[in-house]
Amino acid sequence: MKFLEEVVVEEFLPTFRSLLAADLRARGLTQHEVAELLGVSQSAVSKYAHGDVTVNDDVADDERVQETVERIGEGLASGDVSRVQALVEAEVLVRRLSARGDVVANLHEAAMPALAEYDGDFRVHDPESEVRVRERVLSSVRRGVRVLEHASGFTTLIPAVGSNLVECTPDAAGVEDVAGVPGRILDVMGRTEIPADPEFGVSVHVASVLLAAREAGSDARACLNVRYEADIVAALDDAGYRTVEFDPEDASSTDAVSEAVAANPGADVVYQTGGFGVEPIVYLLADSAPEAAEMARDLL
């Protein structure tokens, strides 16, 4: 009796690790860095690099394996993908390859010929698991933050209260389903300061604005707040974005946002021009955090 997991350990895992180690080394990472990311020893990485590990050609030649290796390698090298997300993506790939008639399943049937007589499907996984969805949102926010960090002059768009960049899960029900930068994105002597890695539930205000817009009919998944100036709103109008003003003096800004978006569900930008004790702010709505960041970058 041979378990599917044994096939994964003996055939898939050495091949996948070998390909991923080679990809990371090709991106300039040291053996030590690769070993840290993969959770293996440097000697193991050396064996992968010198071809001392047996690679299964059926697994290595699969386009999905190659695409996943490239995507995870790029993300790990840049820091946009966490080790948790890399693990989840690899696990999902394993489950997909384990479906009846697929690469790992075929290797399993070769080791256990009696399985060929069974008519069922062995795939039991959910590729849209909550952990995968949330890790992807965090990865997206990291990419958006990177855009802001490298956008020359972004600090000129940061309001006195600070900025934040957020993105929510597809079925977000509350602030805990919205990822953002802990604290705020600040202007520190002309440099964009990102205090910490994105987390869920850390940006109550900007997250609440996003959720209010979505509740009112917006399809936006991300939001970024920047300072208000009439010229900024005019530039957004000229760029083809639909801008909508709301009243900051209403009972709450989120109620005002909901009313404004409900009347203009296609709004890309909602803004208020300030009031007593209220700083004027512009909120950029987008499908993803990187897109919201690019909207701001294009204003510079």
Image: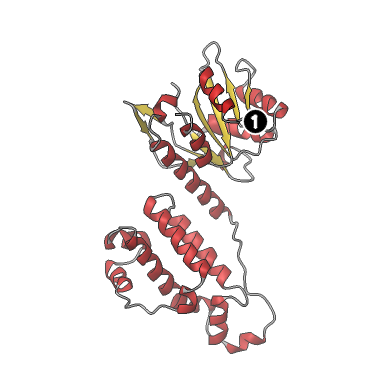
State the quadrant of the C terminus: top left
Q: Residue 264, image x and y in percent?
A: 70, 28
Vertical position of residue 204 compared to residue 108: above or below: above
* Quadrant in the rendering for residue 260: top right
Vertical position of residue 280 compared to residue 258: above or below: above
Q: Is residue 175 visible?
A: yes
Number of labelled discs? 1
What scheme was used to colour the molecule? secondary structure
For image coordinates 41% across by 56% down, the residue present is 74
For image coordinates 64% across by 17% down, the residue present is 250
Direction right: furthest residue: 263
Q: Residue 148, image x and y in percent?
A: 43, 36
Direction front: furthest residue: 238
Q: Is residue 184 left or right of residue 105?
A: left
Q: Is residue 158 visible?
A: no
Q: Is residue 49 left or right of residue 175?
A: left
Q: Residue 100, image x and y in percent?
A: 63, 76
The residue under label 1 is 267
Q: Residue 241, image x and y in percent?
A: 60, 30
For image coordinates 45% across by 63% down, the residue present is 69
**Mark 1 burial class by Cα count in 10 Å: few <14, some 14-19, many 20+:** many
Q: Amino acid at mark 1?
A: Ala
Vertical position of residue 296 compared to residue 127: above or below: above
Direction top: furthest residue: 276
Q: Is residue 55 left or right of residue 101?
A: left
State the quadrant of the N terminus: bottom right
Q: Is residue 21 left or right of residue 171?
A: left
Element marked by disc 1:
loop
